[in-house]
Amino acid sequence: MNDNSTQDFPEGVAFLEVSARHQDRCALQSRDQIRRLTESTRQTYENLGTLLSLLDRMASCFWGCHGKEHVIEDLVGRAVGASGAALRLIEFGHYDEALALTRGIAEIGNLMWLFYIKPDELRPWVDLPEKERRARYCPPSVRKAIEAAGSVVPHDQSDYAWLCEVAVHPTPNVRPQAHNRHGIPTLGGVYQEHGQIECLARLAWGLASVGGPAAKMALIERSRAEAIVEASIQVVQALPESEDKVEIGRSSEDILEKTKWLDRVLRKKNEAS
């Protein structure tokens, strides 16, 4: 064991500045590595930027305000803000924290899908007292309602549980930022390729699951809605793959299957509308 007790270690503002410099160096490495990774990873990153741009404009009424309730726009705005923050955390090497934000986006994705397939659920979600709303629309209840409607759940129980265990809930097996083949924990500010790919893949699916149905429900021009739906599909169609099937292969394959389903359903409803 190395004894560093006699060495000076920064504290106070000096420690915060050192941490920020580590994050900045990691961010530079992360951006550089994006250009060196697979074409699918680079395309996912590019497509995320396009989808975020479109959803940012939708949430902020950039194309004009309809003057009515902004329930859908506000939910999209929450997802956009969380996605932008998650991308920065991925660059900084804070992969667990990025996944924690992705869990929140996944909740919005499931809720948005429920409103899309069962429009009569939106009004109660808005109007019910808080206690009743929390019981009726908590994450497990939303998943069960989607299943009862005969639909695929965008973020099923196993995916949601994984995000909770890895990034949110304290457990005896917590190993912070251990997104590498050897399971070595870090405290952020250290680039890990597996962490970058895993987080981008899960964030991509999370945001697409919000954007696709939201675009179909929002009061915007049809051409704008179609552009968002198409961008959502393109994001997940380009999801990165890895030779490490244990760490990210299963989630990527599952997401790709759900992408085919999302494509079929949204295009079918688009033709009917």
Image: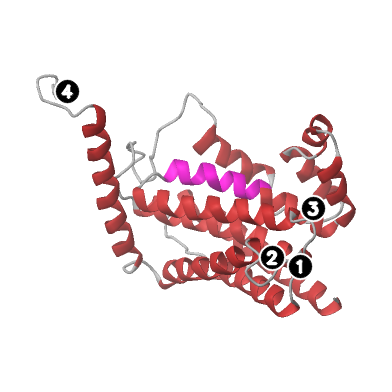
Quarter of the image that includes the N terminus: top left
- Provide the secondary structure element on which disc 4 rests: loop
Neighbour tally class for label 2: few under 14, some 14-19, many 20 plus, Cα within 10 Å: many
For marks 1 and 3, the one nearer the N-term is 3
Residue 216: assigned label: 1
Can residue 158 be found in the magenta stretch? no
Q: Main secondary structure of the magenta part?
A: helix
Q: Is residue 264 above or below residue 100?
A: below
For marks 2 and 4, the one nearer the N-term is 4
Residue 212: assigned label: 2
Q: Residue at x 38, y 40 (%)?
A: 178
Residue of label 3: 114
For marks 1 and 4, the one nearer the N-term is 4
Disc 1 to disc 4, how far (Cα)? Answer: 58 Å
Q: Which residues are magenta?
A: 95-107
- From the top left corner, tell me how far across and down residue 30 is, in percent: 32, 57
Disc 2 to disc 3, how far (Cα)? Answer: 12 Å
- Provide the secondary structure element on which disc 2 rests: helix
Amino acid type for the residue under numbered disc 3: Leu
Disc 4 to disc 3, how far (Cα)? Answer: 54 Å
- Provide the secondary structure element on which disc 1 rests: helix
